[in-house]
Image: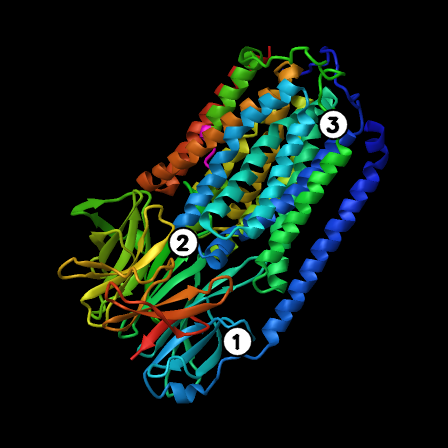
Amino acid sequence: MTTFWAKRRTAIFGAIVVLVTAGVTAYALSAIAENDRRTSRATEATTTSMTQIEKGPRILFRHTGRDADYGHVGAVALDDPGGARALTDLSCDRVYAQARSVSCLATEQGVVSRYRATDLATSTPGKAWREVDGTDLPGLPSRTRISPDGQLVSSTVFVNGDSYMVSGFSTRTLIRRVGGASYGDLEKFSLVVDGREVSPVDRNIWGITFADDDRTFYATVATGGRTYLARGDLTERSLTTVADHVECPSLSPDGTRIAFKEADKAGTRWTPAVLDLATGRRTVLAGETHSIDDQIEWLDDDTVLYGLEREGEPVDDVWALDTSASATPRVLIPEAASPAVLR
Amino acid sequence: MYLSLSDRPTTSAEPRQSGGRVSRTVVTLGIVSLLTDISSESVSAILPLYLTAVVGLSPVAYGLIDGLYQGVSSLVRIAAGWAADRTDRPQPVALAGYAMSAVARLGLIFAGGFGTISAAISLDRVGKGVRTAPRDAMIAASSDPAHLGRSFGVHRALDTIGATLGPLLAFVILWRIADGYDTVLVVSLGFAVLGVATMACFVPFRTGAVRRTAPRRGEPRPKVRWRTVLTPGLARVTGVSGVLALLTIGDGFVYLALLETGGFAAQWFPVLYVGTNLAYLALAVPMGRLADRVGRVKVLVLGHLPLAAAYLCAATGSGALWTTCAAVLLLGVFYAATDGTLAAVAGQLVPEEVRASGIATAQTAVALARLVAATGFGLLWYAVGPRIAMLAVCAVLLAAIPAGLAVMRRAVR
């Protein structure tokens, strides 16, 4: 056995090298071919012009069809969300829009990946969006929101560098005035948890939603292994918790309710839920049985929207769900994610 | 001070090479590490993106996984060192470690949920913990004691080349294939398999064995006693290294402090790791040679001076580019001076039949102390701010270095 091994080991090693190299090369080449085929294929969805869509209320989203327009921002008419879509050349990981402002968070892949937030302004229907402001981001895009008047923009990213710290994950959330000053890192705002002012070392803040007074916002604050819903004040630079066990809040158009994702015990699955701000009553929308990891958007005062990946297929769809406990979800916009409703 | 143990009888199964050339086994082990590091670092580079963007884990779940990543490895290291000594066969123990990581890569390709992914990542880290000490014991056993520092230098340089190429490879793939995460995982698996094959085919089964023949059937296996492992010398080296590791706050913090002072833009963060790696791989062999000449213990302890200097750069840097470059390079010098040297020193301070256990003990103490240091420094950072925190640790470190040197000197006499 030993002599056999000593004699043959070079041949055996050579065989392994050939097999591994051939296998890996074949896989890589077919992946490249598939990639090229996919990125040159025209979209299967019916399309229309942006001039047509921008004439009326609409839903902006990130197109997720595996085709040449993958990752591009698209839009459908609010009254025909399953119908024809208009597609732009703008590539975003996350997109949001309010009034005449669009926020686009994008990754520029490279040996050093760059992450960038770009603010754009829309004007007359069909006219190209104009870039008005932008900033480099310190990590992987996660959430973005714009205030109802289009003046404030927020971004949440995962910070890779911080993950070298204590035990990993960290977010950085910023609020900026479009074309103006930044309010800086929200971790530097004063923080009141359950009525007491604290300055925990492990705080993380993510998922902003703006009220319509250009000053108040809501966010998730995590510290000590718990998550809270906090009300923020840009003038006082403060965050005050108002409820716990809430992630990625989203204020309803009438400002009375917060839609959010509620984590299970292990913190790895989320169910959409709604909190009434006046009464504190929670409704878990258990009709959705998939885990939802998105910042929810409101279609109207009784319906929420969110992106969800198809099972076994890397394509997202935007789903709609009534805010009653027993409602069942339905696909509203196929091949889409990151919805933003422009009424 | 010079640690020459050449008066010990050499009973290793493989004859040691003396003088000029680095042992073939050391180079082969270096190539195994190079291949394995291409494999593991190409995945590490894309893991945050892959888990959050493709698998769809939230950052909280990702944080849990990252915690696993850090913690698991040190726990199994001592057990593996013990197993290598007890069986007197470090090669198969190390091989098992490499194989576990390769299986973990395969698992990661098919993993889809939180549970399977964390299982695959833990298995990878267990594999890393298992292989480290037996491999270092084999390096020590295959080297001329007079050139031990250089041997470890050669191994760490090859290892670091792999760690630098891995992320580069991942980025090239992602640049060519828009979301080619699967391709990165498959390529990574390929390199892991090549590492295992190199180890199995070209590192002889008996490498690092102390006794020429396997114990006969019925003959009791050699006992590995804690008392034999923890010689007064090793206890001091472990203690001093552990205390110094408590003051080693981690590259991440140094880079973050530089980020706070505006020394560079955030998107260049990954480049800093590359810079440190390049300095490390360029200096690993010269530092090993230096350690062989002036004394390994001296280099091991004084190697923390560049670390203190890096803290100073980060704390006092006014945002100038040169302070960033200096800090990045100084961290590389620190690793080049201390990482391989620790294994070399520890392996020489215990009887050779418990060498893997001895190396594992010192490495585990350092790894655990660094985890504590990172957490503790996090608290200090928020309490007093990066500048004061950094200066405080720098001052304590500067005081600890001469004290450590004094204690270590006594250990060696």
Q: At 56% across and 62% down in the image, what residue appears?
A: B179
What segment is highlighted magenta in the picture? B246-250
In the structure shown, which secondary structural element does the residue marked by tag 2 occupy?
loop
Q: Is circle 3 on the same chain as circle 2?
A: yes
Q: Is residue B318 visible?
A: no
Picture quadrant of residue B123 = top right
User: Rounded to the nearest whole Å, what is the CA distance between mark 3 and mark 2?
Assistant: 44 Å
| Amino acid carrying mark 2 in the image | Ser
Instruction: For label 2, count other residues whose C-alpha is less than 10 Å away and answer few (under 14), some (14-19) or many (20+).
Output: many
Residue contact at pointers 2 and 1, CB within 8 angstroms: no
Q: Work out whether residue B378 or residue B87 is closer to the camera in this orientation and state it.
A: B87
User: Per the image, is A131 magenta?
Assistant: no
Q: What's the coloring here? A: rainbow
In this rendered view, identify the residue nearer to me: B34 or B220.
Answer: B220
Q: Main secondary structure of the magenta part?
A: loop
Mark 2 vs mark 1: tell me if same chain: no
Amino acid at circle 3:
Phe
